[in-house]
Amino acid sequence: MVDAAASSNGAAKSSRGSIESVLRPVLAIVLLGLTIQQGQTILTKAYTIRLHAIENYGHIIHEFDPYFNFRAAQYLYDNGWKAFAQWFDYKAWYPLGRPVGTTIYPGMQVTAVWLVKAWLPVWFGFKEWIGMSVPKNVVAKSAWEVSKSLSSSGSNVMSTVASVMATMGMQWNEMSLNDVCCLLPAWFGALATFITGMLALECSADFGYNEGSRFGTVLDQLPFFGYYIQKISCFIRNALASNSGMDMTVDSNSCPPYKRSSLQTASLLSMLATMFFMSIVPAHIMRSVGGGYDNECVAMAAMTLVFYSWTRSLRGSSDGIDKQDVGFALSSQTRTAAFYGALTGLAYFYMVAAWGGYVFVVNLVGVHAATLILLGRHSSKLHAAYSAFYLVGTSLATLVPVVGLTPLRSLEQLGPLLVFLGMQLVEYCERVRTRDNLSRKQVWLMRVRIFGLAGAVGLGVVMLLWPTGFFGPISSRVRGLFVKHTKTGNPLVDSVAEHQAAKPGTYEQYLNIVAKVAPFGFGMVAVGYSNDASSFLLVYAMAAYFFSHKMVRLILLTAPIASVLGGMAIGRLASWCVEGVCGWSLDVWEVFGDEQDDHTVVEAKIVSNGESKKGKKQKAGGTKKSDSPSTTTNKAAEQSTIASLSVLLIIRAAWLFLSYYLYTESQPHIRTFQDSCDQMAVAMSHPTILFNAQTQDGRTIKVDDYREAYWWLRDNTPEDARIMAWWDYGYQITAIANRTTIADGNTWNHEHIALLGRALTSPLKEGHRIARHLADYVLLWTGGGGDDLAKSPHLARIANSVYRSLCPGDPTCSKFSMPGGQPSPMMEASLLYKLHSGGLVPGVEVDKNRFKEVYKSIHGKVRIYRVMSVSKESKDWVLNNRDCDAPGSWFCPGHYPPGLQKVLKDKKDFKQLEDFNAKTEADDEYQRKYFEHLSDPDKARRRSQVKERKDGLTQGKSPRPELDTPAAVPLTKRDIRDINQNWEDNSITSNMFEIVRMNDMDTMTMLLENQPAYAHIRSKDGRGPMWWAHEHGRKEIVKLLKSHGVSDKLRDTDGITPSEMADDEF
């Protein structure tokens, strides 16, 4: 009877096997087709969602830094690489100039120029040749004429390509550099989406090649405890598999015992889910919208390529068996790892050329390699991969002019070097161990000797080089990531909003539902799906969260890892449902292989093992004769088969119901996520240099004040005109107006920016004495919102960090402020305030003998003044006194004219916290007071007011009344009611509208601290800040207004409450 039952079970298995042999290839092809189709849809969405700005405003460069990047790309396009590498720009940082070639990460510019000159003409020509459409902004040229032109200019390769195209009847279709630079972020946004999907594919596939590629817990290889953890995890997975009807069976020896490709159900679905998240998540879109030609848009694709290549190098070869090579031989998996490690180094080189964030990348890879060693996962494969990556990557990185020998000198990058050196010692010890069959005690003695000797040598080298200043300091931006407070100690760095710490709602805003799903993926990887490659995701996740929490700009780094972890959680859940319904796993590569199905081999092995065990039991118990007739035997076998199939159908039905339930329940959340991301994409696609605005009467207008002001400079000032403006606008002025500026966003010279700040925040007469030696015109951003007056306290702090006499004993220069909504005496007397408010605020007049207004934009956003009595002697002196570092050299920086020497004598070079070789006690005291005043600004303001009042009494002046009262008096309910009853349009309501529209949280916070009544003002239509905040989706401003007692239940002239406008929020 036992034999008959076994025969029946075998027949049932054979029947299921025949059905499976037919369905498995079909479903595999369906899965592959679905992946390709959905992948194309996702990539198309990743591209189109980033084009809102281009569709609404045209091919316009956004913001500030992108204008410098475009100008640099134009210079490279016009002059070639050699001239670009030796470009000393005298239109920037007057009178010093800037060596652009050695202070820029040129990868993005090289990419754009290569696309314009080499790739796109061929690609568009080919598309048109085969009958496909090409963009309308493409200009068609004769390929023959282009070939002749390129040949005469020495471009022989591209000349040959153009000649071949002409022979085939193709045209040379060019796209302008401006259009390419505008579209590049969208192209690379889609590319980064695809590469991030490949990272998820690599980290979620169960290969089973070797010990390092098999899934388990992250602690499986931990010394002493790893063996038991692995036993327990395999037992749990087997138990789950046996009760779920899924093909997950593993054994404790191999876990799993078969080799597979990366095209598995879980990996493909994880890839699709990851791409879906990455394509539209706001944390990625924020730096890749059309027109946002900034380094990060290219760097994200480069960074994800490094991470994918690194995890791929840890997979090893399909022939890899041993964890450690024996002796000094090289196995196939070691050679494969070295190959992919070298590719990782190439990708890293592109990352270095594209963005300064390469420091994060190299340290992250180094930390992961070190973590694997500490977890007991060292192998020859890991050694080969990391060594090839570090050697190739670092060697190429030093070729980037702005980097040079920084990887070997900067304290920020010495960590990966130490990991590289330490790994060589570990690998040497392991190879000697396997060659000589050393005992554990002998191995540890050898390690102690080798590491002790290496440590002594390393310490000697450090002690020798340290006094020479060979090792560079940690930058203030990086240092600010590791301190308790959110400031760096450098007022210039602290003045940038994106350098501030992330707020509680930041992750929900920029990651949305991905922030909630990603932790589940993190747990899955850590507990059950960790190997050498996927463990990288755990290190990446912790690092990205830490740094993004310290600096809001770095929320960008969380986009790939949150998408991967969220995608792996969703993808693996979906694959469980698919495999639960089918009863077996899918591997697409099996369809194309001609070898026997590995899964069938494994199943046969398990069945045969079970039958052999049963046979042994029968022999041990003796031979038994069956007393049942054959009819009874057949009936029992039939009943057994029916029962088996019934259980199987119940399990499959349960999985099918669960799959349907999860699908239907997830659809509303998916639609909400998509809609939210679409709205965020629209909100992020508004360029600040050109935007739509709504007037008080409801009309929508296009505000183009800034470009019109720059065009006015271009068309109405001499070519050698020098423009004094705050450094934010320097890039735009040089790129659009083509005029010389004092400073720009490179911010490489703190003392020079402080001089600019001193000129703008000093009394008008003193400021003119500085300006007449540096500039011909002064340009100010006015009109409310984040204009120069709102920024001016930062200007004063920066100036005071170098010129300490500006605000003695007060590093935050708190007396340069607007207590009670009125300018302090210091601000009121400043050049900036006079030029900003002259003729607009009663009693504020500009001395026309020193400054003459020559331009005011239509909407009052920009004012330009001509500097009177400009020192021609200083201008000529600067032009004729540039010192080259060698005769005939291109490196010839300028110098300050003698007319400024009296001012420059007062400066004290700013020593940042990281300048440990040059700091003094005075610098320590300055930093102490700086942080003290930042932590309690009200106390600092009161101190400055007391000091100012005493100084005024000493000089026989009467103190200002507003200095004797608090900065802001709390409003009573009656005050709020009276304000709400007064509806009118004025400059205050216009400015408040602009602050809300621009989402200028810092200005709003500062303004309401001084003028809490502004929170309750109402315009003529009955609406106020609360309505506008809801209308534009400014959640943080809504919270701020509520904290000031503003109600969202009031109604405007149409009876609409603020909360009812939330339906239209961005």
Image (cartoon, rainbow, N blue to C red):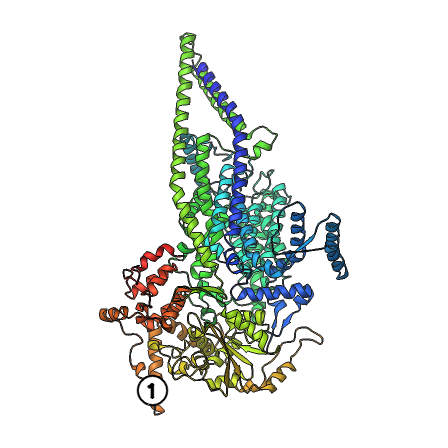
Q: How many marks?
A: 1
Seen from the viewer's position, the closer of residues 817 and 685 is 685
Q: Is residue 234 visible?
A: no
Q: Residue at x 29, y 66 (%)?
A: 1044
Density class for disc 1 (Cα within 10 Å; few <14, some 14-19, many ≥20) is some
Judge from the rendering whether residue 536 lies leftward or rightward of residue 879; answer left or right: left
Seen from the viewer's position, the closer of residues 312 and 446 is 312
Q: Residue at x 49, y 26 (%)?
A: 606
In the rendered image, residue 23, in percent from the top left (x then y), is placed at: 52, 28
The N terminus lies in quadrant:
top left
Residue 402 to residue 840: above or below: above
Judge from the rendering whether residue 800 lies leftward or rightward of residue 424; answer left or right: left
Seen from the viewer's position, the closer of residues 225 and 52 is 52
Dot 1 corresponds to which residue? 950
Residue 386 to residue 839: above or below: above
In the rendered image, residue 1034, in percent from the top left (x then y), is placed at: 38, 60
Q: Is residue 139 visible?
A: yes
Seen from the viewer's position, the closer of residues 405 and 843 is 843
In the rendered image, residue 1045, in percent from the top left (x then y), is placed at: 27, 65
Residue 31 to residue 978: above or below: above
In the rendered image, residue 1040, in percent from the top left (x then y), is placed at: 33, 64
The C terminus lies in quadrant:
bottom left
